[in-house]
Image (cartoon, rainbow, N blue to C red):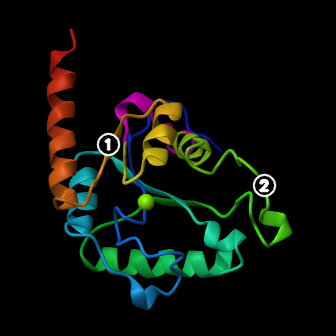
Amino acid sequence: MSASPGGPPLALFDRDGVLIVDKPYQSDPDGIVWMPGAAAALRLARAAGFRIVVVTNQSAVARGLCSEADVQAFHRAMALTLEASGAHVDAWHYCPYHADAVIARYRIADHPDRKPNPGMILRALAQFGARAGASFLIGDRQSDLDAAARAGVPGFLYAGDQALDALVGAILAGRGSAELAKP
Ligand SMILES: [Mg+2]
Protein backbone atom coordinates (compact mmCIF):
# COMPACT_ATOMS: atom_id res chain seq x y z
CA MET A 1 0.00 0.00 0.00
CA SER A 2 2.16 2.86 -1.26
CA ALA A 3 1.09 6.45 -1.62
CA SER A 4 1.98 8.36 -4.77
CA PRO A 5 5.09 10.56 -4.62
CA GLY A 6 4.03 13.91 -3.30
CA GLY A 7 3.70 12.85 0.30
CA PRO A 8 5.62 14.45 3.16
CA PRO A 9 9.40 14.00 3.17
CA LEU A 10 10.95 11.66 5.73
CA ALA A 11 13.39 12.31 8.53
CA LEU A 12 14.93 8.85 8.96
CA PHE A 13 16.83 8.03 12.14
CA ASP A 14 19.02 5.11 13.02
CA ARG A 15 18.17 3.94 16.55
CA ASP A 16 21.28 2.80 18.43
CA GLY A 17 23.89 5.53 18.71
CA VAL A 18 21.51 8.19 17.37
CA LEU A 19 18.26 8.25 19.36
CA ILE A 20 19.58 6.17 22.24
CA VAL A 21 23.01 5.21 23.53
CA ASP A 22 24.34 2.19 21.62
CA LYS A 23 24.62 -0.82 23.93
CA PRO A 24 25.39 -4.22 22.41
CA TYR A 25 22.22 -6.17 21.54
CA GLN A 26 20.01 -4.26 23.96
CA SER A 27 16.43 -5.42 24.38
CA ASP A 28 15.53 -4.38 27.95
CA PRO A 29 13.56 -1.10 27.91
CA ASP A 30 14.77 -0.38 31.46
CA GLY A 31 18.27 0.06 30.03
CA ILE A 32 17.35 2.80 27.55
CA VAL A 33 19.56 5.88 27.77
CA TRP A 34 18.53 8.69 25.45
CA MET A 35 21.00 10.65 23.42
CA PRO A 36 20.93 14.39 24.21
CA GLY A 37 18.27 16.29 22.27
CA ALA A 38 16.66 13.16 20.76
CA ALA A 39 13.04 14.06 21.49
CA ALA A 40 13.66 17.69 20.57
CA ALA A 41 15.17 16.56 17.25
CA LEU A 42 12.04 14.59 16.38
CA ARG A 43 9.79 17.50 17.36
CA LEU A 44 11.85 19.87 15.23
CA ALA A 45 11.76 17.68 12.12
CA ARG A 46 8.05 16.99 12.43
CA ALA A 47 7.28 20.70 12.93
CA ALA A 48 9.18 21.30 9.66
CA GLY A 49 6.80 18.94 7.85
CA PHE A 50 8.75 15.68 7.94
CA ARG A 51 7.40 12.31 8.94
CA ILE A 52 9.62 10.50 11.43
CA VAL A 53 10.86 6.99 10.65
CA VAL A 54 13.28 4.80 12.60
CA VAL A 55 15.35 2.29 10.59
CA THR A 56 17.42 -0.10 12.69
CA ASN A 57 19.39 -3.31 12.19
CA GLN A 58 18.52 -5.71 15.02
CA SER A 59 20.62 -8.81 14.48
CA ALA A 60 20.10 -9.64 18.16
CA VAL A 61 16.95 -11.39 16.92
CA ALA A 62 18.89 -13.52 14.43
CA ARG A 63 21.45 -14.27 17.13
CA GLY A 64 18.73 -15.59 19.44
CA LEU A 65 19.37 -12.89 22.05
CA CYS A 66 15.83 -11.53 21.89
CA SER A 67 12.63 -12.01 19.91
CA GLU A 68 10.89 -9.75 17.42
CA ALA A 69 8.23 -9.26 20.12
CA ASP A 70 10.99 -7.96 22.40
CA VAL A 71 12.12 -5.51 19.72
CA GLN A 72 8.55 -4.32 19.24
CA ALA A 73 8.05 -3.93 23.00
CA PHE A 74 11.32 -1.98 23.18
CA HIS A 75 10.04 0.36 20.47
CA ARG A 76 6.69 0.77 22.25
CA ALA A 77 8.59 1.78 25.39
CA MET A 78 10.63 4.29 23.38
CA ALA A 79 7.45 5.64 21.78
CA LEU A 80 5.77 6.12 25.17
CA THR A 81 8.69 8.16 26.48
CA LEU A 82 8.82 10.21 23.29
CA GLU A 83 5.06 10.88 23.29
CA ALA A 84 5.38 12.11 26.88
CA SER A 85 7.70 14.82 25.61
CA GLY A 86 5.60 15.67 22.58
CA ALA A 87 7.63 13.71 20.02
CA HIS A 88 6.15 11.16 17.65
CA VAL A 89 7.59 8.38 15.49
CA ASP A 90 5.40 7.68 12.45
CA ALA A 91 6.95 4.30 11.54
CA TRP A 92 9.43 1.85 13.01
CA HIS A 93 11.36 -0.44 10.66
CA TYR A 94 13.80 -3.04 11.97
CA CYS A 95 15.80 -5.78 10.27
CA PRO A 96 16.12 -9.01 12.29
CA TYR A 97 18.17 -10.92 9.68
CA HIS A 98 21.85 -11.78 9.71
CA ALA A 99 24.17 -14.12 7.83
CA ASP A 100 25.39 -15.67 11.11
CA ALA A 101 21.94 -16.22 12.62
CA VAL A 102 21.59 -19.08 15.09
CA ILE A 103 17.86 -19.16 14.25
CA ALA A 104 17.47 -20.63 10.76
CA ARG A 105 14.61 -18.47 9.53
CA TYR A 106 16.66 -15.31 10.18
CA ARG A 107 19.80 -16.66 8.50
CA ILE A 108 19.89 -14.63 5.31
CA ALA A 109 23.16 -13.23 4.00
CA ASP A 110 23.02 -9.69 2.68
CA HIS A 111 19.28 -9.31 3.29
CA PRO A 112 17.91 -6.37 1.27
CA ASP A 113 16.65 -4.75 4.50
CA ARG A 114 19.93 -4.98 6.40
CA LYS A 115 21.86 -1.74 6.18
CA PRO A 116 23.99 -0.90 4.20
CA ASN A 117 21.23 -2.23 1.94
CA PRO A 118 18.40 0.27 1.46
CA GLY A 119 15.32 -2.00 1.83
CA MET A 120 13.88 -0.40 4.97
CA ILE A 121 14.41 3.10 3.61
CA LEU A 122 12.83 2.29 0.24
CA ARG A 123 9.84 0.74 1.99
CA ALA A 124 9.38 3.79 4.18
CA LEU A 125 9.60 6.14 1.19
CA ALA A 126 6.92 4.11 -0.59
CA GLN A 127 4.79 3.93 2.55
CA PHE A 128 4.56 7.72 2.79
CA GLY A 129 4.92 8.59 -0.91
CA ALA A 130 7.99 10.58 0.06
CA ARG A 131 10.58 11.87 -2.37
CA ALA A 132 14.02 10.48 -1.53
CA GLY A 133 15.88 13.68 -2.36
CA ALA A 134 13.62 15.76 -0.11
CA SER A 135 14.17 13.43 2.83
CA PHE A 136 17.23 12.86 5.03
CA LEU A 137 18.74 10.19 7.23
CA ILE A 138 20.90 10.47 10.34
CA GLY A 139 23.11 7.54 11.34
CA ASP A 140 26.20 6.92 13.41
CA ARG A 141 27.88 4.41 11.07
CA GLN A 142 29.08 4.34 7.51
CA SER A 143 26.60 1.51 6.83
CA ASP A 144 23.76 3.95 7.63
CA LEU A 145 25.12 6.49 5.18
CA ASP A 146 25.68 3.82 2.51
CA ALA A 147 22.08 2.64 2.88
CA ALA A 148 20.84 6.22 2.56
CA ALA A 149 22.98 6.79 -0.54
CA ARG A 150 21.67 3.61 -2.17
CA ALA A 151 18.12 4.90 -1.60
CA GLY A 152 18.98 8.35 -2.96
CA VAL A 153 18.45 9.96 0.45
CA PRO A 154 20.93 12.56 1.78
CA GLY A 155 22.71 11.02 4.77
CA PHE A 156 24.34 12.73 7.75
CA LEU A 157 26.75 11.24 10.25
CA TYR A 158 25.98 11.83 13.92
CA ALA A 159 29.10 11.45 16.03
CA GLY A 160 27.26 12.10 19.29
CA ASP A 161 29.40 15.17 19.92
CA GLN A 162 26.44 17.55 19.89
CA ALA A 163 22.78 17.42 20.82
CA LEU A 164 20.78 15.64 18.12
CA ASP A 165 18.39 18.57 17.72
CA ALA A 166 21.36 20.82 16.91
CA LEU A 167 22.29 18.54 14.02
CA VAL A 168 18.69 18.40 12.78
CA GLY A 169 18.51 22.19 13.00
CA ALA A 170 21.65 22.50 10.90
CA ILE A 171 20.33 20.03 8.32
CA LEU A 172 17.02 21.90 8.06
CA ALA A 173 18.83 25.23 7.73
CA GLY A 174 21.10 23.85 5.00
CA ARG A 175 18.17 22.29 3.22
CA GLY A 176 16.33 25.62 3.32
CA SER A 177 19.19 27.44 1.64
CA ALA A 178 19.57 24.64 -0.92
CA GLU A 179 15.88 24.97 -1.77
CA LEU A 180 16.25 28.74 -2.10
CA ALA A 181 19.25 28.28 -4.39
CA LYS A 182 17.17 26.31 -6.88
CA PRO A 183 16.20 28.29 -9.99
MG1 LIG B 1 23.70 2.91 15.05
Q: Residue at x 37, y 37 (%)?
A: 135
Residue 131 location (% of width, % of height) = 44, 31
Q: Is residue 59 magenta?
A: no
Residue positioned most to the top: 183
The numbered mark, 2 or 1, whose residue comes first in the sequence reads: 2
Which residue is labeled 1 in the image?
156
Disc 2 residue type (three-letter):
Ile
Residue 119 location (% of width, % of height) = 62, 44
Q: CA distance from mark 2 to mark 1?
A: 28 Å
Q: Is the residue 182 above or below the residue 56 in the image? A: above
Q: Is residue 127 magenta?
A: yes
Q: Could you say whether the residue bearing mark 2 is in a helix, strand or loop?
A: loop
Residue 142 location (% of width, % of height) = 43, 45
Horizontal side of 102 relative to 85 (left or right) equals right
Q: Residues within 10 Å of mark 2 (few under 14, many from 20)?
A: some
Which residue is labeled 2 in the image?
108
Q: Could you say whether the residue bearing mark 1 is in a helix, strand or loop?
A: strand
Q: Is the residue 150 above or below the residue 158 in the image? A: above
